[in-house]
Amino acid sequence: STLAKMYAKAFPIYAVKMLSKTFDEGKDTDYNKNFSSFVHKSYRLGYMEEFGRKQLDPEVMKATVEGDSISVRPLWSEMIQLQIQAKIEASSNFDPNLGRVDAGLNRRGRIFKFSSKFIDNEKDFNKCRIKNKFMITPRHKNMEYLNDDMGKLALFHIYKEYAKKYYDEGLKLPSKCKDAFEQAALESDILGDWVRRQFCHSDNNKDRFNKSQIKDLMQGIDMDDFDEEDKNKFKIKNVIAAMKAEGYCYKKDVRHGGRRGCLVCIKNAITF
């Protein structure tokens, strides 16, 4: 986050800090207000110091990254349609709570893992200097350098070479950044993980599960393994959505077990 703060201080017309809850999913998250700062200024970077702890809203994230129109209500104004043209970055100490990730979000998300080289105080700075270790000057010193135009110009020249390379060659990211995002998606997709362990596809149309049977299987989940937020995800409508995402077909007019509506071509993957 220190790098983003340095960029914002040197180039305030290009960068803006966003609320950590900007992409949180749920009716309690008034995300359109969090984008209101983009209405009057064409920022190129929106940064957050942490992601929110709630599950992120994949549709809002995709629309923002893609530059699609989203609904925004500036303070004391009517709802408008806005296209976010900025790159969105979050510097977080934990992986984002992605929930169920589709192919569209997988194409757009990347995770970079950094080890900070910043020194937090003068004492540590002098210790590293004596031992001739590689280091960057204390955090507060970096900000002080940017109080005048010479410091801002020095930072500009550092960025200039990377900007030129981006302009000439486009954005090239290591494959490990894509892999890290996909791994985080798998680890946070607790519903999909349960579905994949519990069920498997079948070629027989008579292999079926209705909602009542799925609820019975859900009773066997050890909820002590999850925090309160994850426990609330285990609702039948969310599980059915996760099963559809795994390619299972729900037919509301097909009967099974005396009930109308069931998933077809599906069987229990757990055998005894």
Image: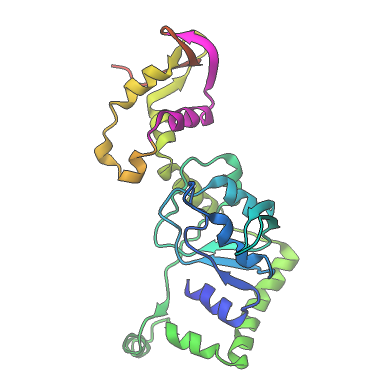
Residue located at (48% from left, 32% from top): 242
Image height of 179 relative to 37, above or below: above
Of all residues, the one furthest to the right in this rendering is: 168
- Whether 244 is among the magenta residues is yes
Q: Seen in the image, is 144 located left or right of residue 133? A: right
Query: In x, y percent, where is residue 98?
Result: 47, 47
Front residue of 128 and 40? 40
Query: In x, y percent, where is residue 137?
Result: 44, 85
Front residue of 269 and 5? 5
The count of marks equals 0
Instruction: Please tell me in which quadrant of the rendered image residue 155 appears.
Output: bottom right
- Whether 220 is among the magenta residues is no
Front residue of 78 and 96? 78
Quadrant (top left/top right/bottom left/bottom right) for the C terminus: top left
Residue located at (38% from left, 21% from top): 214
Front residue of 57 and 131? 57
Query: In x, y percent, where is residue 58?
Result: 55, 46
Residue located at (46% from left, 50% from top): 28
Residue located at (49% from left, 85% from top): 142
Which span of residues is magenta-colored? 234-256
Instruction: Please tell me in which quadrant of the rendered image residue 170 appears.
Output: bottom right
Image height of 115 relative to 257, above or below: below
